[in-house]
Image (cartoon, rainbow, N blue to C red):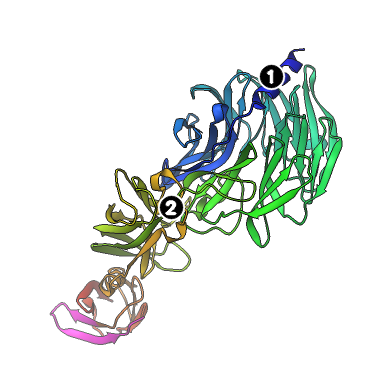
Amino acid sequence: MKRHLTLFLYLWIVGMPLMAQPINLSLNRGPFTFGHTLIPAKDGNWLVGGSAGFIMGYPAIDPYIALVRADGEILWEHFLNDIPYSELGTVTDMAYDPVLQVYYATGYLSGCDYGLPGFLYQFSSDGQVNWYLETPFYFSTHNLALQAGEGVVIAGEYPMLLQYYDASGNLLQEADLADAYNLLPLDLAGMGNNTTAVLGEEQLLLLNWGAGGWAVTAEMAVGGGQALSFIPEDTTLIVLGETKAYKLSASLEVIAEADISSFGEYPLLACSDSHCYALGSKPDEPFLALSFDAGLNTFQSFAFDGAYNHPSGMSTRNGVLFVTGNAVPDSQDSFFPGGLSGFYRYRGSDLFLQSWQADGTPTTSGMDVEVLNASFGDLQASLMEGGCDFSSDQHMNIQASNIRVRLRNNSSVTLNRLQLNAGLFPCSFICSTIQTFNRTYSNLNLAPGATVILDFPDIQTFPLPYSNPFELCIWASGPNEKLDDHFEDNEACLTFVISSTEEVRAALAGLTLFPNPAPETLNIQFGAELTQDARLSITNTLGQEVMNRAVNKGERELQLGIGYLPAGAYVLVVKAGEESVARRFVKR
């Protein structure tokens, strides 16, 4: 009786009508702020999960969660950094329990080159952490299925396990599907009555968590499993395979099926109020949304503008599609859901949350900021011997100051808030790294059509792969904490030309002589190729010049015959323009 009452309360509460208010939000909690998963919350709010942080040689990017009101106000937020030694982490799945009025969030943690256990958190409705624990899944996207009023089931990839936790965080049962089913869980759905649907690449299982242990009560072959969603109103499942969509009963009987092979592949799915949405792609269309009724009668796809607002998670409410993801400065051409798999392709990111109507109409922000140009005052470049990539035998440091960015407010409303950002890819050692520069500007009060010049922070780079000229691009994001409707004109680039003096200085500074002492032949190696013609001379201890010869531009190594010189000490000087270097050697 208790199970049936719990399921009834769950269906009644989640089925209560709430008007879906359109939303357009851009959120920055660090140079890298990612949105990876999204669920409806109580009172028409949204719970968004992802990660946020920065990189300073090593990444410091923590899982992040926020409760967002429909008008975009942040009600509460948390960085989930209680578990030590993490460098990279993200939230990959969440659930709201309307019976207990608590939230769950799960995801993974790692270092840049080592694995860590994942995590499971429970939060009160006002955002307090009730408890958290480590999960056994390494390098795994975590999936979560709610058992309303009872607890949650989570699954990962390594190892192939499902774990059932009660509402106090106690592990009740563990199901190992590796040996009997060789099933890698791709998606989960809680169906009430202690039953969980588990989707793999080729099969769908129903697991019942009985008092005597877990048992598979039904199974079904699914070709190319993608995603599933439970519809509590009629206790049915919608399942997407590679070529087919299925509507299934609570015992996995096929109620309806449809061929969706012409629409593409859709790894993200959400259903509510008798309507479903999926996000995916086709080979020639990287960002698509599929809209269809829960009876699988009518399907409509539309192109989703994901080039700059890169989708990663989604949900639905009252027939409206809601998407979260990463607002990035570089146009993307492929779709990948959830996690940090695309992390190193970005120079920076803001988390976004945006709604779309069933006909493919997005909720626009009305914001349009154009970055007109950027300038700098002073530049210092230091070139050093030794490359840090496969294309150069030098690396460099750059200092630039008095940087100014000129922008125009093309919006129809006053611009009050904005971020300016820049990102560079320095030399990498153990871990890939991205150096970021950011500044938030508030109280701008910039009227429609007006321009402003903003000071940007001085640049002091980590060691960079050598490049001349060198380019630094600065982009604007989050105008009035919303997405820019025209992001393609949000960037201006500075071009730094490193002077020949700097290059010659680096070449001469790295000059080495060997062997030393030298019997018959003296080898000379410069720190880099000479960028201009030079002159080489050798003098003895009496100041007499015993050799003078030209060294051509482009030389990196020389070999001098010195057998005719008397034994003794000498000074070799190389002069190029205003720069010169001297080295002592001994003729044996």
Residue position for label 2: 434
* Image quadrant in which you'd find residue 564: bottom left
Magenta span includes 484: no
Residue sitting farthest toward the front: 412
Highlighted range, magenta: 536-554
Residue 198, x across and y down, in percent: 75, 35
Q: Which residue is drawn at 65% across and 60% down?
A: 285
Residue 239, x across and y down, in percent: 76, 41
| Residue 358 sits above or below residue 588 on the image | above
For the stretch drawn in magenta, what is the main secondary structure?
A: strand
Q: Which of marks 1 and 2 is nearer the N terminus?
A: 1
**How many neighbours does mark 1 have within 10 angstroms: few (below 14), some (14-19), or many (20 or more)?**
some
Q: Residue at x 28, y 55 (%)?
A: 452
Residue 177 seen in this snapshot: no
Q: Which residue is drawn at 69% across and 53% down?
A: 301
Residues 72 and 341: in front is 72
Residue position for label 1: 9
Residue sitting farthest toward the left: 542
Whether residue 171 sits left or right of residue 90 in the image: it is right
Whether residue 318 sits left or right of residue 297 in the image: it is left
Figure quadrant of the N terminus? top right
Magenta span includes 547: yes
Query: Could you tell me how many numbered marks the image carries?
Result: 2
Figure quadrant of the C terminus? bottom left
Q: What residue type is labelled 1?
A: Leu
Q: Which mark is residue 330?
A: none
For label 1, the SS is helix
For label 2, the SS is loop
Residue 209, x across and y down, in percent: 76, 23
Q: What residue type is labelled 2?
A: Ile
Give the alpha-carbon distance from disc 1 to disc 2, as whole Å.
Answer: 48 Å
Residues 160 and 321: in front is 321
